[in-house]
Image (cartoon, rainbow, N blue to C red):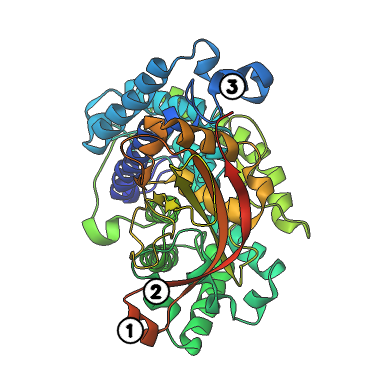
């Protein structure tokens, strides 16, 4: 039965949403715990202590303002993993309401603290999306009360901005989205192809046009149906889920697709599959808190809503340092050519025409042409993603690429752990260089003849041979 504040019909949707969101949190904290030392640690490429000295606290609030050390960061990240895992197991439903809310709030605060010192390594839309969804989860309650309708509508508003924002940025951006040809290229040129991307790329062009048209329908039309009565809203959410699963199969987009699926599940009427589940109404103090938070978020929604209507729509922008209400979007422009940086080293002290160079192999980004792209999402390979951006323009690599090369020359263990293969296991190389190649998927015949998934052609030198001074 639906009351003015809570709705029993969404008890299952809330349960699934909260536990699935906790699973995404778990992946995010695990990613931070395993990669931070090389990226932002005290000896990392972009050290947190240096960042904290440069940036005012109001622009980047974080518990690391109180203290930073690699040991403390590791404690925060692994604590986030433990708290997330407990929520996946349903711990919040066994606790008093106020304790469960505090638990979700601590999780949000810990991840906010990481994102706000993560610098370019954390400059992705799915970081702010996780924070915005995580903040709303604080006010969803638990099994002790009915799911609050206002928060459920705020989750739909968030999903609307994710999908509609992505649809608008495409229509306003690259012409190929309007003539339905973007997917002729996208499966090949996307940041990190997956194990099925080669096969998706070789679908008939007519299928690619259907893909693009279906994307426009789901991102530009279906989001409005999320606000329709049930079961229409549930059907709309199902279409979003189906589209996101297609994207999961075709590439590696960290936890973006999975988190979008989680948001869509919150719009499903759980009574359609599990019947009623009577729960008590919320206490007055909880209703007051939810009303206040809803009012705040609606006021903060002004700028993201205005951004959706703007001809100069921004993609993936935060409007406040707490990342409470943000703008989203993806692939307003699609590359026609795939460029990749190949990093090589040599142990020869004196360079000559016959110098032997050996390649470093990354975990996710293309390198060895015979290596099938792997599936890593929802896990996020931050270095691999930034290497894709660096190949697009050296400006994306200005702050971190030379420190990365320096650590290869030093044989830094934390940096080498981010790689799939280190060609210098015994001692560091004497020189390192980077070269830019054009990569394309092989044809079916090339694949049968050579066993290679990629064909590559040298373009130019990106970084001349470099050694430690």
Res. 416 visible in picture = yes
Question: Residue 247 or 291: which is nearer the viewer?
Answer: 247
Report the Cα–Cα distance between label 1 and label 2. Answer: 16 Å
Q: Residue at x 35, y 19 (%)?
A: 75
Residue 264: quarter of image? bottom left
Would you name the residue on which mark 2 appears?
198
Work out how far the residue at label 3 is from the one at label 2, CA to CA, in angstroms: 42 Å
Label 2: few (<14), some (14–19) or many (≥20) C-alpha neighbours in 10 Å = many
Q: Residue at x 53, y 67 (%)?
A: 189
- Give the vertical position of 348 relative to 355 (above or below): above
Q: Could you tell me which residue is drawn at 64 percent across and 46 percent down?
A: 396
Q: Residues within 10 Å of mark 1 (few under 14, many from 20)?
A: few
Q: Foreground: 13 or 204?
A: 204
The single residue placed furthest to the top in the displayed view is 66
- Which is more foreground, mark 1 or mark 2? 1
Question: Of all residues shown, which one is farthest toward the right?
Answer: 311
Name the residue tied to disc 3.
Answer: 61
Judge whether residue 32 can be spotted in this image.
no
The first of marks 3 and 2 along the sequence is 3
Q: Nearer the viewer, residue 222 or 379?
A: 379
Image coordinates of residue 171 in percent, x first then y, are: 67, 70
Q: Position of residue 173 (x, y in %)?
A: 70, 67
Q: In this rendering, is residue 272 above or below 352?
A: below
Q: Choose mark 3 or mark 1, whichever is in front.
A: 1
Q: SS at mark 3? A: loop
Provide the residue designation for mark 1.
449
């Amino acid at each position: 039965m639906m009351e003015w504040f809570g709705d029993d019909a969404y008890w299952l949707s809330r349960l699934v949403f909260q536990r699935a969101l906790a699973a995404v949190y778990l992946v995010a904290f695990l990613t931070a715990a395993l990669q931070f030392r090389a990226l932002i640690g005290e000896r990392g490429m972009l050290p947190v202590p240096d960042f904290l000295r440069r940036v005012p606290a109001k622009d980047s609030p974080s518990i690391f303002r109180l203290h930073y050390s690699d040991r403390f960061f590791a404690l925060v990240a692994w604590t986030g993993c433990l708290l997330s895992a407990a929520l996946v197991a349903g711990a919040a439903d066994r606790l008093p309401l106020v304790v469960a809310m505090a638990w979700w709030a601590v999780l949000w605060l810990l991840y906010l603290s990481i994102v706000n010192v993560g610098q370019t390594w954390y400059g992705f839309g799915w970081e702010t999306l996780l924070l915005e969804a995580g903040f709303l989860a604080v006010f969803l309650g638990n099994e002790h009360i009915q799911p609050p309708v206002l928060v459920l509508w705020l989750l739909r508003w968030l999903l609307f901005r994710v999908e509609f924002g992505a649809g608008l940025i495409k229509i306003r951006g690259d012409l190929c989205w309007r003539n339905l040809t973007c997917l002729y290229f996208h499966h090949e040129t996307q940041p990190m192809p997956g194990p099925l991307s080669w096969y998706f790329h070789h679908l008939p062009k007519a299928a690619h046009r259907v893909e693009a048209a279906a994307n426009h329908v789901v991102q530009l039309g279906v989001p409005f149906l999320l606000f329709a009565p049930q079961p229409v809203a549930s059907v709309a959410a199902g279409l979003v889920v189906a589209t996101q699963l297609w994207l999961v199969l075709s590439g590696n987009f960290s936890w973006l697709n999975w988190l979008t699926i989680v948001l869509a599940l919150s719009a499903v009427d759980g009574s359609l599959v599990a019947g009623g589940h009577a729960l008590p109404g919320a206490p007055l103090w909880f209703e007051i808190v939810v009303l206040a938070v809803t009012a705040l978020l609606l006021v903060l929604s002004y700028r993201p809503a205005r951004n959706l209507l703007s001809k100069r729509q921004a993609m993936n922008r935060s409007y406040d340092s707490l990342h409470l209400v943000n703008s989203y979007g993806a692939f307003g422009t699609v590359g026609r050519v795939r460029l990749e940086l190949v990093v090589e080293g040599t142990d020869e002290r004196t360079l000559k025409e016959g110098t032997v160079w050996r390649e470093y192999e990354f975990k996710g980004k293309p390198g060895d042409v015979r290596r099938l792209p792997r599936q890593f999402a929802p896990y996020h390979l931050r270095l691999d993603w930034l290497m894709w951006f660096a190949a697009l323009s050296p400006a994306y690599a200005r702050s971190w690429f030379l420190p990365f090369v320096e650590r290869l020359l030093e044989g830094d263990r934390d940096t080498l752990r981010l790689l799939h293969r280190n060609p210098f296991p015994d001692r560091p190389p004497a020189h390192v260089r980077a070269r830019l190649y054009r990569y394309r998927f092989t044809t079916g015949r090339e694949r049968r003849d050579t066993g290679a998934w990629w064909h590559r052609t040298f373009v130019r030198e990106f970084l001349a041979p470099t050694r430690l001074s």
